[in-house]
Amino acid sequence: MIKVLFVCTGNICRSPTAEGVFRALVAREGLEAAIGVDSAGTHGYHVGDPPDARSCAAARRRGIAMDDLRARQVRAADFEAFDLVLAMDRGHQRSLAQLCPKGREARLHLFLDFAPHTGVQDVPDPYYGAGGGFERVLDLIEAGSAGLLAHIKGRMLL
């Protein structure tokens, strides 16, 4: 099984949205037995909390359910447990690089590197913005998820 971890700041907006979108894509492709999905935050601000209600509502409008998810904080052991640790922005990538055990650096990637056609590197944080930001985040995450799944299928022979 290939295991993927999405990481943002508090694990209530971007990374659970990525988990929900990618989980739904994996299910549509019938690959649940081959690909595991989770998310976490670089900070423990919201440990145990569900995703932001605005993130859930935006995802629900696209047929994505994520109300069952709960925030957790990333740990160094995640670099052992997951094959891909995907940072939602460059700040998260820097934080994760400091946490990453020696020899596991190749597991850390910037999520939108899997969607270079977007011209964007960072998934913007919609938390303090207006509702439209959650739709923009979903657009970027859907693009990144499609590229990520293509990468996994191509590189790991699923």
Image: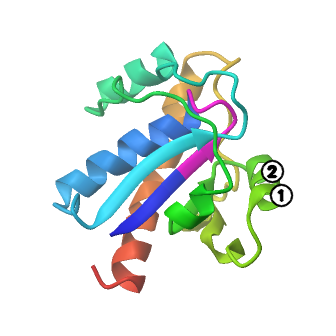
Which one is nearer the viewer's eye here, 135 or 104? 104
Whether residue 53 sits left or right of residue 30 in the image: it is right
Q: State the residue position of label 1.
A: 98
Question: Which type of secondary structure does the marked residue at label 2 adopt?
Answer: helix
Whether residue 143 sits left or right of residue 110 in the image: it is left
Specify the quadrant that holds the N terminus: bottom left
Instruction: Give the percent coordinates (x, y) of residue 48.
Output: 52, 22
Instruction: Give the percent coordinates (x, y) of residue 29.
Output: 19, 61
Specify the quadrant that holds the C terminus: bottom left
**Residue at image point 49% right, 30% down:** 135
The part of the chain drawn in magenta is 6-12
Which amino acid type is shown beneath numbered disc 1?
Gln
**Image quadrant assignment for residue 102:** bottom right
Instruction: Give the percent coordinates (x, y) of residue 146.
Output: 39, 60
Labels 1 and 2 touching (C-beta < 8 A): yes
The answer, for residue 155, to whether it is visible in the render is yes
